[in-house]
Image (cartoon, grey):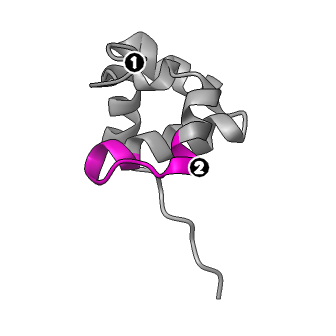
């Protein structure tokens, strides 16, 4: 029997296109608009704990795999 992959949490994806980075060089920038180089830095140094870390690691994986265009429809809904 095959394992069915878990569906992404829709709220998580909506937060990626609506939540701003709360600190640092890119404070105020939407998480989905953060540059890959910044996300790579977090990946090397460690993502923050909690919800922000989950969101940053998620957008990192999305961008790493070239899937950021999938967020455009959600971004337009905001």
Residue corresponding to mark 2 = 44
Please report contact status of discs 1 and 2: CB closer than 8 Å, yes or no: no
Mark 1 lies on residue? 30
The structure residue drawn at horizontal position 34% and vertical position 17%, both measured from the top left corner, is: 27
* Sooner in the amino-acid sequence: mark 1 or mark 2: 1
Q: Position of residue 75 (x, y in %)?
A: 44, 16
Secondary structure mostly seen in magenta is helix
Residue 14 rendering spot, x and y as whole percentages: 35, 31
Q: Is residue 59 above or below residue 3?
A: above
Residue 58 in percent (x, y) is at 49, 45
Residue 63 in the image: above or below residue 32: below
Dividing the image into 4 quarters, which one contains the N terminus?
bottom right
* The quadrant where residue 21 appears: top left
Residue 72 falls in image quadrant: top right
> Above or below — where is 8 with respect to 68?
below
Of residues 59 and 43, the one drawn nearer to the viewer in this rendering: 43
Q: CA distance from mark 1 to mark 2?
A: 21 Å
Q: Check if residue 64 falls in the magenta segment.
A: no
For the magenta stretch, what is the residue range?
42-54
Q: Is residue 61 toward the left or the right of residue 34 in the image?
A: right
Q: Tell me the element at label 1.
A: loop
Q: Where on the picture, by quarter, is residue 13?
A: top left
How busy is the neighbourhood of tag 2: few (under 14 within 10 Å), some, or many (20 plus)? few
Q: Quadrant of the C terminus?
A: top left
Q: In the displayed structure, does residue 60 sit left or right of residue 47?
A: right
């Amino acid at each position: 029997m095959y394992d069915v992959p878990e569906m992404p949490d829709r709220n998580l994806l909506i937060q990626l296109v609506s939540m701003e980075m709360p600190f640092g060089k890119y404070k105020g920038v939407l998480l989905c608009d953060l540059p890959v180089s910044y996300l790579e830095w977090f990946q090397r140094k460690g993502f923050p704990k909690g919800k922000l870390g989950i969101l940053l690691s998620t957008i990192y994986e999305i961008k790493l795999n070239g899937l950021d265009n999938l967020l455009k429809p959600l971004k337009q809904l905001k």
